[in-house]
Image (spheres, grey):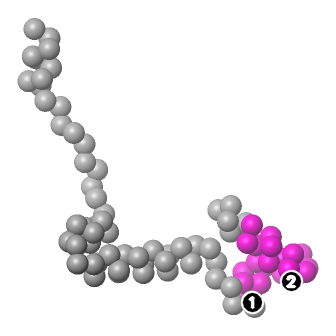
Amino acid sequence: MPLQRAQNYNLKQITNAPWFITTKEIHEILNMPMVREVINSHDSRYKSRLQKYPNQLAGQLTIPETTRRLKKRRDLFDEYSQ
């Protein structure tokens, strides 16, 4: 993930960490969450707010959809082929 790589690079530069210190250790020492953790926390808060929203259609946005496709209507094709 490009954002995570940029964060790791910048944290190593800021802390002047030696090469053998892992990025995980740097994150733990600085108490800095990973980008994926921040995204997941924002996502879960957003979904919980949508569930509480008065508009029922907004709450349905969080329900995972199955793949919906348009069905072919044979009668339309037959109409044009004649």
Q: Residue at 23% x, 78% y: name it.
A: 54
Vertical arrangement, residue 38 with respect to residue 81, above or below: below
Mark 1 packing: few (<14 Cα in 10 Å), some, or many (20+)? few
Q: Is residue 20 visible?
A: no
Q: Is residue 16 above or below residue 70?
A: below
Q: Percent position (x, y) of residue 9?
A: 80, 70
Residue at 86% x, 83% y: name it. 15
The image quarter in which residue 20 lies? bottom right
Tell me the amino acid under the disc marked 1.
Leu
Q: Main secondary structure of the magenta part?
A: helix
Q: Position of residue 69 (x, y in %)?
A: 25, 42
> For residue 30, which numbered disc appears in the image?
1
Numbered circle sitting on residue 66: none
Q: CA distance from mark 1 to mark 2?
A: 9 Å
- Position of 28 compared to 18: left or right? left
Tell me if residue 53 is in the magenta stretch: no
| Label whose residue precedes the other's in the sequence (1 or 2) | 2
Start-end of magenta stretch:
6-28
The structure residue drawn at horizontal position 69% and vertical position 90%, both measured from the top left corner, is 31
Residue denoted by label 2 = 15
Asked whether 19 or 57 is in front, the reply is: 57
Left or right for 78, reference 47: left
